[in-house]
Amino acid sequence: MENRPKIVVLPLQPDRGQDFNGMGLGIHFLLGNLLAVHTGFAEFWFGWRIKNLFSKIEDLRSFTRGSGPLFPLPEHAAREKIRFWVSGKYRQYKDYIIVSVTVNDFDMQREYMWELRIDPFDHLIGFSKQFLSLVDDHILDLPHGQFAKAFWHEKITFQGLDFLGYAVDATYEGMITGEELNLKWFEKAVLDSPESYLINDLKGWALYKNRNYSKAVEFFSNAIKINPNGLGALAGMMWCNISKKERDIATKFCFAKADVRNESHAKAKAFIDKKFKNY
């Protein structure tokens, strides 16, 4: 039985006086990727739960734009059995972004609030290290060896982060509707910041969802070159090759994904065996 707690990062909302742009969703996507290497958590991807939290696009838009009613966190925490909820606000200045993060622990009835600064000139390393250090100090210990796996040089501009956020928005709306994704924002993001792990990973998933598996592999491969421990891109490679019925390659990436999370190859092999049992 799984005893590890679950955590979810909600999209960041614009702070008072801040116009909505893609920054909040881009930062939200970064935080989810950072938490993915924390093996103390059993679950960490917002997208896995989105349809349970937002049944209509209008509800999601209302939340991300900060114009909707108060999100009923206690109700969702109880129903979804998720202990930790990360939310926050963002405010953009000329050369930096201030992010106000709130973490609610619904088991211990505690709330933690942090103010962090994003400076794109250090490839988001300072922000990422500060966030995970605070999680390690106040929320849940980061298992030994995982801290170093979490960081990569995220070569993204503020404009690229903005485009990334709009691409995240399009991805989530597609998850709710089930419709094919329009790649406009993904293409803008790649053109602006072609060496961004987050952008290459997300475009890979967009292409995967549009069933363009061969093209998706190209972007996942780019992402892994930038960040070899990128759990999202490794999972994307695995799922693309499951869809292409390439068992050996799918197994390779399933093992690589397990290594990042310190999980057993036996469990990974059992997963692949189940996916290929009818092939």
Image: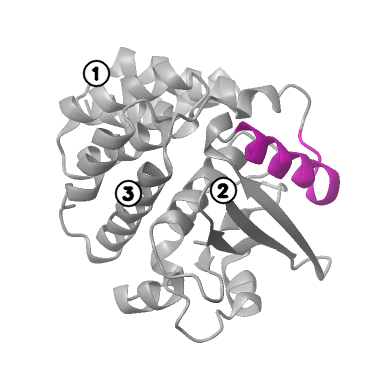
Q: Nearer the viewer, residue 273 or 29?
A: 29
Neighbours of disc 2 within 10 Å: few (<14), some (14-19), many (20+)? some
What predominant SS class does the magenta segment belong to?
Answer: helix
Q: Please say whether residue 126 is one of the residues in the magenta stretch.
A: yes
Amino acid, disc 1: Glu
Q: How many angstroms separate mark 2 from mark 1 (CA)? A: 44 Å
Amino acid, disc 2: Tyr
The numbered disc on residue 246 is: 1
Q: Tell me what residue is drawn at x 16 percent, y 44 percent.
A: 210
> Which tag, 3 or 1, sits closer to the chain's start?
3
Q: Tell me what residue is drawn at x 34 percent, y 40 percent.
A: 202
Residue at which label 3 appears: 163
What is the span of residues highlighted in magenta in the rendered image? 125-142
Give the image location of residue 245, x and y in percent.
21, 23
Give the image location of residue 237, x and y in percent.
33, 26
Amino acid, disc 3: Phe
Helix, strand or loop for disc 1:
loop
Is residue 193 shown left or right of residue 187?
Answer: right
Give the image location of residue 152, x and y in percent.
55, 25
Q: Nearer the viewer, mark 2 or mark 1?
A: 2
Q: Is residue 135 visible?
A: yes
Q: How is the image coloured?
A: one colour
Helix, strand or loop for disc 3:
helix
Is residue 43 shown left or right of residue 190?
Answer: right
The numbered disc on residue 96 is: 2
Q: Quadrant of residue 124?
A: top right
